[in-house]
Amino acid sequence: MSGNGHSEKKDPVLVIVQLSGGNDFMNTLVPYNEGHYYDARPLVGVPQDEVMPINDELGFNPAAERMKKMYDGGDVAVIQGVGYPNSSRSHFRGMDIMHTCEPDRISTEGWVAKLIQRLDPDSENPLTGINIGRGLPRAMAAPGVTATSVGDLDNYGLMPDIQAEEDRNRDLEIFKRMYTPAIGAGMVMDYLRQTGTDSLAGADMLAPVPGMYESSVEYGSNPIAKALRDVARIHTAGLGARVFYTNHIGYDTHSHQPPVHPGLLRDMTGALDDFLTDLREHDAADEVAVLVFTEFGRRMKDNGSGTDHGSGGGAFIIGENVEGGLYAEYPSVDPKDWLNGEDLKHTIDFRGIYGTMLEQWMGVEPEEIVVGEFEQVQPFKKTMLPN
C-alpha cells in the first residue's frame, strides 16, 4: 500500500468540500464596481468600501479574508460561473445531479464512488475513499464500491462494539433519509443491501490515528475546521487514503443572509487556510488538492432578507501546486443577460471542473465518470503524475 505524508512516493490526493445549501458566489467574490449588483441587492449587497479587491472588477467578501490571503499567495484558483444547462433549483435534485453528473436521469452511481473504483478496483483498501461526517454522501455511493464514513475520529477506537454498530446503522439510516426524496426508496434500499455496513468497515483501521498526530496549528472549533483537521490527521498517518469528502452546511440563505453568510465564509476560509498550513508543516501539502463546490448559486435580486435558489455559482481549487488566479468567466450581472430574467448564466459546466480534477490531478480518464466530454480549466503548475 502506498502511503502519503512522509512516504517517498506520493500519490495525488483529492479533498472535496461541499458547501450545502447553495453558496452565494456573487457575495463571496463580489463585482464591486457593478451598479447592477447593488441595484439588485439593496439589502444583501456587500458595501463597496468593505470589499477586498483582487482586480478592478472583483473582490472578496471581507469575511473571506483568509481566502484572499491564500489567493494572494497563489494557492487558490477561482472557477467562475459554474453550472449546467437547465439547472435544477431543488436542493435534493440539484445536489443529486452534482453528485452523479446525470442531469437528465436518475443514477445509482456517485462520481466519487466511480473514482474510488478506478483507484482501487479490487477494494483492497477500505480507506481509499473517506467521508468525514455523518451518513455517506451520494457522490461516494455506488453498488460494489466501499467507502468509509467517520463521524467522530477521536472516539472511533474507544466505542464498545455494540455502540459502534449502532453508530454505523444510524449513519446508514441518515443516508437513506437523505437520498430517498431524490432517487426513491427502491434505489436507496438496493444500494444499502449491496453495500450494507461494509461501506463503513474501514473506520476500525482509523482508531490509532489521533494518537499519531501532532501539530502547532490551532484550528477553529466549528464543524468544517474539525472536519478538515480530521482529514489532515488521517492523511498524515499514511494509510493510503486518496479521496476525502466533507460537508459544510448552512448556505441556504433565504433569510437573515447578512448576519449568517459572513460567518459561514469566515469558518470555511479559516479552516481551509489552517488545513493548508497544517499540511505544509507536515511536508504533506505537495500531493493534496482541494475542490470546494456548491449545488447552485443564488438569484440576482435579494428577497428583502436573503437570496433564493439560482444558478451560475462558483468553485475553488486550492493547494500547494495550484496556479492561483481566475478561471472561466464571471457571469454578466447586466439585467439584459440574466437567465429567465432573474439568474446568472453559467459560463462553464461543473462536469468540466470534476474532469479537471480527475484527469489532470488524479490521473483518471474522466469521460465515463462525468458522463461526457466537457471543457476543462488548467489550474495546476505541477502534479504528482508521471510526465
Image (cartoon, rainbow, N blue to C red):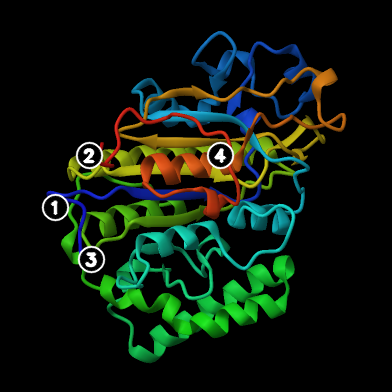
Q: Nearer the viewer, mark 1 or mark 2?
A: 1
Q: Nearer the viewer, residue 160 or 352?
A: 352
**Mark 2–mark 3 distance (CA, rounded to whole Å):** 19 Å
- CB under 8 Å between callouts 1 and 2? no
**Mark 1–mark 3 distance (CA, rounded to whole Å):** 16 Å
Q: Nearer the viewer, mark 1 or mark 3?
A: 1
Q: Quadrant of residue 24?
A: top right
Q: Residue at x 46, y 86 (%)?
A: 166
Sequence-wise, the earlier of marks 4 and 1 is 1
- Residue picked out by circle 3: 209
Q: Nearer the viewer, residue 208 or 330?
A: 330
Circle 1: residue type: Ser
Quadrant showing the N terminus: bottom left
- Residue picked out by circle 1: 7
Q: Nearer the viewer, residue 378 or 75?
A: 378
**Mark 3–mark 4 distance (CA, rounded to whole Å):** 35 Å
Circle 3: residue type: Val
Which residue appears farthest toward the right when viewing the image?
Answer: 341
Which residue appears farthest toward the bottom when viewing the image?
Answer: 162
- CB under 8 Å between callouts 4 and 1? no
- CB under 8 Å between callouts 2 and 3? no
Location of residue 341 in the rendering, given as x and y in whole percent from the top left corner:
87, 29
- Residue picked out by circle 4: 352
- Residue picked out by circle 2: 280
Circle 4: residue type: Gly
Q: Secondary structure at mark 3?
A: helix
Sequence-wise, the earlier of marks 2 and 4 is 2
Q: Residue at x 62, y 68 (%)?
A: 108
Circle 2: residue type: Arg
Q: Nearer the viewer, residue 363 or 110?
A: 363
Q: Nearer the viewer, mark 2 or mark 4?
A: 4
